[in-house]
Amino acid sequence: MKPIRLSAHALSYIAKRGFTVAEVEETIRTGRWEPAELVRMECRKRLPFNREWNKKIYPSKEVRPIFVEEADEIVVMTVYTYYS
C-alpha cells in the first residue's frame, strides 16, 4: 500500500473546506478511482457529519480528493468537500 501525501496546497485548505487527513486517506483507500482533469484521479466518499458547518447543521459531507498516483506514493493535489 503506497503512502498518501497531501501537497502544500491541499494542506492549506483543511480548515477552509473542513476535511481531515484521515478522511482523505480513507476515501482514497476505499473509494472507486475515476479519471479527473489533467491526467489526475479522483474518488468520493460520503461520511456522516451531523454537525454545524458555516452556521448550518448538515447530516453528511462528501470528501472528494484529486490526486496523482506516482511510483512510490499518492500525492493529493487538492480536496473538495460538499455538505448536505
Image (cartoon, rainbow, N blue to C red):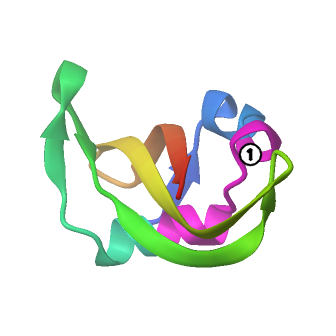
Q: Is residue 49 left or right of residue 14?
A: left
- Could you tell me residue 37's position as x and y percent? 21, 23
Q: Amino acid at mark 1?
A: Ile
Residue extending furthest toward the front? 56
As for residue 15 lying within the magenta part, the answer is yes
Does residue 60 appear in this view? Answer: yes
The answer to whether 26 is drawn above or below residue 65 in the figure is: below
The answer to whether 30 is drawn above or below residue 65 in the figure is: below
Residue extending furthest toward the top? 38
- Could you tell me residue 42's position as x and y percent? 28, 46
Of residue 59 and residue 17, the one placed in the foreground of this image is: 59
Query: Residue 83 occupies which quadrant of the picture?
Result: bottom right
Range drawn in magenta: 14-25
The answer to whether 55 is drawn above or below residue 20 in the figure is: above
- Give the structural element (helix, strand or loop) at label 1: helix
- Could you tell me residue 11's position as x and y percent? 71, 40
- Could you tell me residue 3's position as x and y percent? 47, 65
Q: Residue at x 68, y 31 (%)?
A: 8
Residues packed near mark 1 inside 10 Å, few (<14), some (14 to 19) or many (20 plus): some
Q: Is residue 61 left or right of residue 9?
A: left
Query: Residue 48 occupies which quadrant of the picture?
Result: bottom right
Which residue is label 1 attached to?
Answer: 14
Q: Residue at x 52, y 49 (%)?
A: 82
Q: Residue at x 34, y 59 (%)?
A: 44
Q: Residue at x 69, y 42 (%)?
A: 17
What main secondary structure does the magenta stretch of the protein show?
A: helix
The answer to whether 45 is drawn above or below residue 10 in the figure is: below
